[in-house]
Amino acid sequence: MLRLELIDISKQYPAVKANDRIRLRVEPGEIHAVLGENGAGKSTLMKIIYGAVEPDEGEMVWDGKQVEIRDPREARALGIAMVFQHFSLFDTLTAAENVWLGLDKSWSLADVTQRISEVAHEYGLDVDPLRPVHTLSVGERQRVEIVRALLTKPRLLILDEPTSVLTPQAVQALFVTLRKLADEGCSILYISHKLDEIRALCHKCTVMRGGKVTGEVDPRQETNASLSRLMIGAEPPQLDHKTATPGEQVLDVRALSLARTGAFGADLADVSFDVRRGEILGIAGVSGNGQQELMAALSGEDTRSPPDAIRLFGQPIGGHSPRRRRHEGLHFVPEERLGRGAVPSLSLAQNTLLTRTEAVSPFGWVSVKRTVALAQQLIERYNVKAGGPDATARSLSGGNLQKFIVGREIDAAPKLLIVSQPTWGVDVGAAAQIRGALLALRDAGCAVLVVSEDLDELFEISDRLVVIARGRVSPSVPAAQATREQVGRWMSGLWHDAAQEEALHAAA
């Protein structure tokens, strides 16, 4: 008997038909991938299964019986759990309190706290149940969501981009968990843009394009190229990564030490590195090792740094505000798209005003016409699928919103661009487009600093690499000379070999 069957599920939104007569069959113990571009309708379909979105038509059959799931509570009662790409957590509550809210009230908060620790340990997911969510990095929030889902002992687990901010080691640990769940009879619907993961993990793969199912295949019998062709109709474009010829020093960070601002952050200790014109420096690391604190110090959100600890073109900027740093040529793309990179309820045109001032007069008057024109220019230049400049940020898929935000900052012609998690949750084609844009910016003479937990991404676009672990930064190593094994060791802080450091500094 099938665990889940969808029959002709359709959902129409004002500007687009997200799902068009979708058929899907999932067996018990099956890990079933749903593959498609950003905006293909995958997330809408998963929300319909979970009861968060109501379909316009179609049938859903659960364990052989037709059901109507009107809200997530009914889905959870059936044994359906979902981990969303954009997290549904309250920032002011602890991880345990967030998990407790979604559970049967027969559980006490103390029981939930203990069970979180047990499940996190059992499945190799590092989660502190007592930490407030606002102190967690994106990767740590992802782990809270996964543990919350596992706590309910689901019969169907829906994962929307679960590994987008996990390290390779954590991904492998998660795969062990998912295979164990499948062996126990749990069905898994797995959304990912990482084709290698789908081929390694999943038993079946349903491919969607433009809201329709275009095929079902066994991903273990496919190649990345064949899956890409099914998904986007073509193979992803190949990046032209030319050898860098770095110029003058743009960013110089020297002996930067900062105490954490909260009980659960990371102290920065003697952080030193530089970035030059015409190069991309990649920063690798497990989430929660000081990336948030470093990005806050570099972007100007945290102005406690000694002025000389951060220099831009030789000038101390440690105490400068984010606005002043933008005026001096430093632009920043945060890891959180909704809430920090863009205001969810505002239009794309209005969101351009967060970091762009071309449409604002010296007296503070905003030209609506110029704002709309700028947003339209970004939509067209970066191939953003949206309902136009008036579309709200929250109405875009994750990948399309990311293209818009990254495009907004690249289009400003920065002298230094700092990007955190540039292709988190972005499909193959959009990821290639963003990475290509970063390489083109580098080739135009910009200094680029990329913080990412995706090692494949860092090796693909970086000229030099450093690793951040426990608030400290490793020596730099040319990306062409680094190995994933070496970087993986460094992510545990194992680079403290004086002879090795000296050799690496000489090579860099």
Image (cartoon, rainbow, N blue to C red):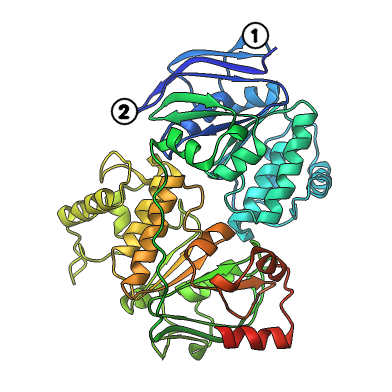
Rounded to the nearest whole Å, what is the CA distance between mark 1 and mark 2? 32 Å
Position of residue 323 relative to residue 140, above or below, is: below
Answer yes or no: is residue 302 visible.
Answer: yes
Q: Give the secondary structure at mark 1.
A: strand
Left or right, residue 494 beside residue 237: right
* Residue that mark 1 sits on: 65
Residue 219 in the figure: left or right of residue 405: right
Q: Which residue is mark 2?
A: 14
* Figure label count: 2
Position of the N terminus by quadrant: top right
Q: Local crowd at mark 2 within 10 Å, few (<14), some, or many (≥20)?
A: few
- Residue 354 in sight here: no
> Looking at the picture, how far across and down is residue 49, in whole percent?
56, 24
Query: Vertically, is 459 above or below 162?
Result: below
- Amino acid type, label 1: Lys
Looking at the picture, does residue 507 appear above or below residue 142? below
SS state under label 2: loop
> As rendered, which of 464 and 75 lies closer to the eye?
464
Of 456 and 399, which appears nearest the observer? 456
In the image, 89 versus 457, the foreground residue is 457
Q: In the image, residue 179 lies at what x, y percent?
A: 75, 36
Q: Position of residue 106 (x, y in %)?
A: 80, 31
